[in-house]
Amino acid sequence: MENRIRAEREKRGWTQAVLAERLSVSRQSIVALETGKYDPSLPLAFRISRLFEQPIEGLFTPDEG
């Protein structure tokens, strides 16, 4: 799944550590999310969506195929 987490984080001037703290996850989780190595759980996807004030569909795009 592709996502816009890095772009939204950078738009706000947040580091990965700041985002991790705001979401109550590890910085390594943010790295994995941003690189596409990890897809968030549904509760985490909702927290990310609320934090960035974006619909989930605006942040996450399913892989084609």
Image (cartoon, helix red, strand yellow):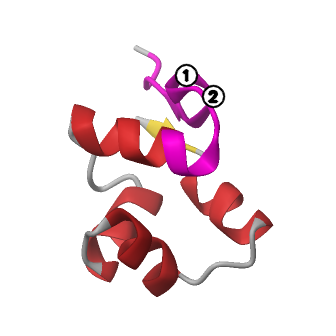
Element on which disc 1 rests:
helix
Question: Residue drawn at (64%, 40%), measured in percent from left and top?
Answer: 53
Element on which disc 2 rests:
helix
Amino acid type of the residue tagged 2 in the rendering: Gly
Answer with left or right where residue 35 lies relative to residue 61.
left
Looking at the image, residue 4 lies above or below residue 8: above
Q: Position of residue 1 (x, y in %)?
A: 40, 35
Q: Position of residue 44 (x, y in %)?
A: 29, 45
Q: Which disc number belongs to residue 57?
A: 1
Residue 23, magenta (yes or no): no
Whether pointer 1 and pointer 2 mark residues with C-beta atoms closer than 8 Å, the reply is yes
Distance from the alpha carbon under mark 1 to that under mark 2? 4 Å
Amino acid type of the residue tagged 1 in the rendering: Glu
**18 or 10: which is nearer to us?**
18
Q: Which residues are magenta?
A: 50-64
**49 or 5: which is nearer to us?**
49
Looking at the image, residue 10 lies above or below residue 16: above
Answer with left or right where residue 28 lies relative to residue 47.
left
Answer with left or right where residue 23 lies relative to residue 50.
left
Q: Position of residue 4 (x, y in %)?
A: 61, 47
Question: Residue drawn at (50%, 82%), measured in percent from left and top?
Answer: 18
Residue 61, magenta (yes or no): yes
Looking at the image, residue 65 lies above or below residue 42: above
How many numbered circles does the render carry?
A: 2
Q: Quadrant of the C terminus?
A: top left
**Residue holding disc 2:** 58
Question: Residue drawn at (58%, 26%), measured in percent from left and top?
Answer: 55
Q: In the picture, residue 5 is in which quadrant? A: bottom right
Q: How busy is the neighbourhood of tag 2: few (under 14 within 10 Å), some, or many (20 plus)?
A: few
Q: How busy is the neighbourhood of tag 1: few (under 14 within 10 Å), some, or many (20 plus)?
A: few
